[in-house]
Amino acid sequence: MNDIDVVLDQDPAARNRLEVIFTYSGVHALWAHRLAHWLWKRCRMYFIARVISQVSRFFTGIEIHPGAVIGQRLFIDHGMGVVIGETCEIGDNVTIYQGVTLGGTGKEKGKRHPTVKDNVLIASGAKVLGSFTIGENARIGAGSVVLKEVPPNSTVVGIPGKIVIQDGQRVEQTLDHHNLPDPIADKLKELEEEIKALRSERELLNTSSKEKPFA
């Protein structure tokens, strides 16, 4: 029931339980994953577990490896294009939007996918790649590429991901992730201002050279 309750809590478009049960692909993917994970871990029926995960992927557009460990109240909103790798570990009360990848960076063995702690939000199109930890209450901005550990209570945006909010500053627990600051855009704005200043200096120099009388 937690899977249904979290959708009703977080998605204003969800009107009732029946609608969530029959029309939410994120819920369907989680239910399929729980069966596949049980077969993977308890019964060591790896082939059947993979078949279930691939059938789920076909119908939902969400690929969750049977080996991934997922906590309670995971909310996958829309979900198309979400990929969760084999050694990924996800805590409780995590929100993931469409197009998110929790993947590895190569053919390394062992733990090669991220660990996502409790109360993390990962916005649309974000890529979290590698074996490191996303701390509690962290926020990953839309389209970000995260390649290293994120401390708790931090907000990360950009490519590669940079921390723009950390301890001491409050992060709102809302879905308003499109208003996160963008350090790359800020840097480009600074460069634009510098170019304008240089152009103004050049124009002044050109004007003064034209006005200067010949000897």
Image (cartoon, grey):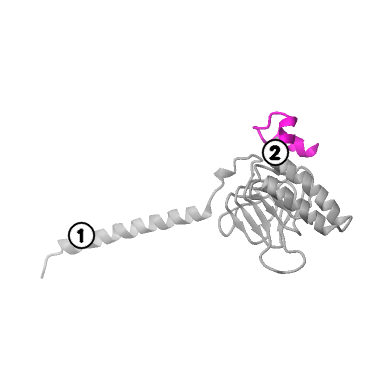
Q: Which mark is residue 109?
A: none
Of pointers 2 and 1, the one earlier in the residue sequence: 2
Spot occupied by residue 135 in the image (x, y as percentages of width and height): 71, 53
* Rendering quarter of residue 145: bottom right
Q: Mark 1 sits on what residue?
A: 207
Q: Is residue 84 above or below residue 95?
A: below
- Per the image, label 1 sits on a secondary structure element best described as helix
Quadrant (top left/top right/bottom left/bottom right) for the C terminus: bottom left
For this orientation, the residue located farthest to the right is 43
Q: Amino acid at mark 1?
A: Thr
Pointer 2 local density, CA inside 10 Å: few below 14, some 14–19, many at least 20: some
At a point 59% along the width and 44% down the height, the residue shown is 177
Cβ–Cβ under 8 Å for marks 2 and 1: no
Q: Mark 2 sits on what residue?
A: 24
Q: Does 199 sit left or right of 212 as displayed?
A: right
| Region rendered in magenta | 1-22
